[in-house]
């Protein structure tokens, strides 16, 4: 017999970002393994209020006042249907999480909250840095359980006095690409992300300019954002017009195609959760080079399945080494994909969540 799991997320398909793609992959895999999943979100356009996608039910709540309206509609939905659910899985740390925590206290339904990033600017930091934030977080830690997707998120939750037995360490998942097309004679280096300051695309462009490159080697910057104009000027100033291209925003499928055809992926961000782009690059058998920050340690073992750099000089050195050593390029890519297959693929991650739901509900789901 199926047991229902409710997943709550403020925005969802057709609005798709990193959090939404993670929920999509997880809900699809859990549904394929006979779990009954409902996803509740806000209807932000003219999409149908209900549809069946990949085996799970998507319920869009119509609200004309964006944030407050969704909270009111979610309150009504939970009040009406809470008895159907064994576990409520919340994919945000914002106000819907607090509302679900209150329902957990009143109706004794386990609530699991996914925490995707720690440190400055994260949702967690907002709870730490204000009086009301601390009060709200005390409601969460008394009445809910947490998923920490990286060791640094786990450490920050513990530092905020969340009991260790209330934290489950489960990383993000990724779908594994089957068709890959690599051309080692025309190397492609890829950056994929929003063009904002913390992503540090300019650091990669500067490093790319400094290295010796074989003929045909190119750098593709996929994404858009407020830093685009300054990056355009930088490319002109460094005379990289023939080897560095700003691709703009692409669909997810277009981005996956580029990763399938690229050789090297670089993640220069100085602050990340568990990067979906990094997971997808590793799944596509790219040699990955990433900033040496705590979140990336959960994925990358230096010199085994990827490389970690500390500054612009070390990034340049690592790029040059991978570009000019085909054995290393190939072995890093193969090891990266093996890591994904064995630890981070959605079948592995969904099994970890199913076990967690069993623990929280006290029954085998």
Image: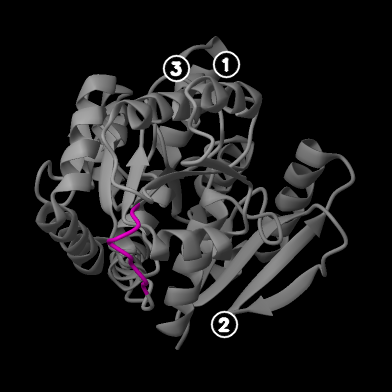
Which mark sits nearer the N-terminus, 3 or 2? Answer: 2
Q: Nearer the viewer, residue 238 or 107?
A: 238
Mark 1 crowdedness (10 Å alpha carbons): few <14, some 14-19, many ≥20: few
Q: Give neighbour class at mark 2: few <14, some 14-19, many 20+ (Cα, 10 Å).
A: some
- Quarter that holds the N terminus: bottom left
How far apart are the alpha carbons under marks 1 and 2? 40 Å
Q: Which residue is mark 3?
A: 128
Task: State how many labels appear.
Answer: 3
Viewer-closest of 237 and 247: 237
Residue 87: image location, x then y, percent:
47, 61
Residue 87 showing in the rendered view:
no
* Residue 319 coordinates in the image, percent (x, y): 24, 38
Residue named by callout 1: 132
Q: Quadrant of residue 115?
A: top left
Relative to 144, 344 lies left or right: left
Q: Residues within 10 Å of mark 3 (few under 14, many from 20)?
A: some
Is there any visible trace of residue 365 in the rendered image? Answer: yes
Q: Residue, x 81% and y 52% (percent of image)?
A: 44
**What is the quadrant of the C terminus in the image?**
bottom left
* Extent of the magenta region: 180-187
Height in image: 347 above or below 268?
Answer: below
Mark 1 / mark 2, whichever is N-terminal: 2
- Mark 2 element type: loop
Give the label, 1 or 3, closer to the camera. 3
Q: Residue at x 43, y 19 (%)?
A: 120
**Residue 29 drawn at (x, y percent):** 43, 75
Q: Nearer the viewer, mark 3 or mark 2?
A: 2
Identify the main secondary structure in magenta: loop
């Amino acid at each position: 017999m199926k047991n229902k799991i409710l997943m709550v997320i403020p925005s969802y398909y057709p609005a798709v970002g990193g959090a939404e793609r993670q929920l999509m992959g997880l809900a699809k895999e859990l549904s394929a393994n006979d779990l009954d999943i409902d996803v509740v979100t806000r209807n932000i356009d003219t999409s149908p209020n209900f549809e069946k996608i990949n085996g799970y039910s998507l319920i869009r709540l119509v609200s004309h006042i964006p944030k407050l309206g969704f909270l009111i509609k979610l309150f009504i939905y939970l009040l009406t249907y809470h008895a159907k659910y064994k576990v409520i899985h919340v994919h945000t740390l914002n106000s819907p999480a607090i509302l679900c925590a209150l329902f957990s206290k009143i109706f004794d339904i386990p609530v699991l909250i996914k925490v995707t990033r720690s440190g400055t600017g994260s949702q967690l930091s907002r709870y730490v840095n204000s009086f009301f934030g601390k009060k709200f977080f005390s409601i969460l830690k008394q009445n809910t359980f947490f998923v920490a997707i990286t060791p640094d998120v786990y450490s920050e939750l513990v530092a905020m006095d969340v009991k260790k037995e209330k934290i489950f360490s489960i990383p993000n998942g990724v779908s594994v690409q089957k068709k890959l097309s690599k051309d080692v004679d025309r190397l492609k280096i890829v950056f994929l992300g929003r063009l904002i300051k913390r992503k540090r695309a300019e650091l990669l462009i500067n490093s790319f300019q400094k290295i010796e490159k074989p003929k045909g080697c190119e750098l593709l910057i996929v994404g858009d954002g407020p830093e685009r104009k300054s990056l355009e000027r930088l490319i002109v100033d460094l005379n990289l017009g023939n080897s560095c291209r700003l691709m703009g925003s692409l669909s997810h499928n277009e981005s996956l195609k580029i990763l399938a055809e690229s050789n090297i992926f670089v993640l220069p961000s100085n602050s990340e959760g568990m990067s979906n782009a990094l997971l997808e690059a590793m799944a596509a058998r790219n040699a990955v080079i990433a900033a040496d920050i705590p979140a990336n340690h959960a994925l990358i073992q230096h010199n085994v399945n990827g490389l970690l750099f500390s500054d612009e000089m070390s990034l340049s050195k690592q790029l040059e080494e991978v570009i000019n050593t085909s054995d290393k390029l190939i072995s890093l890519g193969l090891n990266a994909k093996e890591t994904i297959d064995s630890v981070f693929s959605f079948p592995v991650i969904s099994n970890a969540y199913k076990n967690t739901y069993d623990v929280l509900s006290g029954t085998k789901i």
